[in-house]
Image (tube, rainbow, N blue to C red):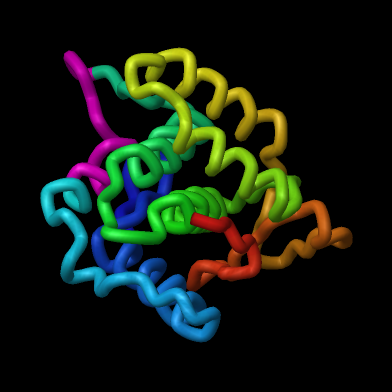
Amino acid sequence: MIEENGFRYLDKEDIARIHAALSAWTEKEGEPVPPFSLAKEADIDSLVNISRHRFFDREAYPTLEEKAAIIFYTVNKRQIFLNGNKRMSTLCLLVFLGVNDKTLAVGADELTDKALWLAKTDTLDFPSVKKDLAHWIHSHLVDYGPNETIADTSTTTQPPRDQPSTDAQVGE
């Protein structure tokens, strides 16, 4: 975990743990994902750094919602992994929000629909897609602190604070 400018960011080890949790879940479901070691190394490094990216000493993604959106977008669209990218993008999004004491008040179906929608978007539409994602995240963002629980978990997706959840089953 990397802490910087009031935010907590995922590092390579966090992403590897998220992948391991997804891998364990998909193995049980009969659709194993290839090992983390086969992921595109340069894209993993890019994923770790992209939400902290700066241009001319200004943050490219200054808000939590924009940082979350670019993480979701990057894993989903770059196809970093040989399989499981939509699921990984969703888990990375949720874990990033979780370590920053937030989560999304959405059900698994809506989260799945958003990941599938994102996968079908044109990469040339990046500015509008990023804006739409940040707005969607903002409109569903809720607090998730260490001592808080959210009563209706059927409409709220929340990962455990120390590992990714596989309850938000996003199909690939």
At x 63%, y 61%, the residue is: 168
Residue range corresponding to the magenta coloring: 46-57
At x 54%, y 27%, the residue is: 134
Task: Find residue 35 and report its horizontal and vertical position in percent.
Answer: 25, 74
Task: Find residue 44 and report its horizontal and vertical position in percent.
Answer: 21, 52
Question: Of 63 and 104, which appears nearest the observer?
Answer: 104
Q: Is 53 part of what is drawn in magenta?
A: yes
Residue that sits furthest to the bottom in the current view: 28
Q: Is 91 part of what is drawn in magenta?
A: no
Task: Find residue 48 and report its horizontal and vertical position in percent.
Answer: 26, 48
Q: Residue 159's image quarter?
A: bottom right
Task: Find residue 148 and report its horizontal and vertical position in percent.
Answer: 75, 62
At x 57%, y 69%, the residue is: 166
Q: Residue 58's image quarter?
A: top left
Residue that sits furthest to the left in the current view: 42
Position of 112 relative to 12 (above/below): above
Position of 161 relative to 80 (above/below): below
* Quadrant of the rendering where the N terminus is positioned: bottom left
Residue that sits furthest to the front in the current view: 30
Q: Is residue 11 left or right of residue 138?
A: left
Q: How many marks?
A: 0
At x 67%, y 39%, the residue is: 141
Position of 152 relative to 120 (above/below): below
Residue that sits furthest to the right in the current view: 151
Question: Of 26 and 138, which appears nearest the observer?
Answer: 26
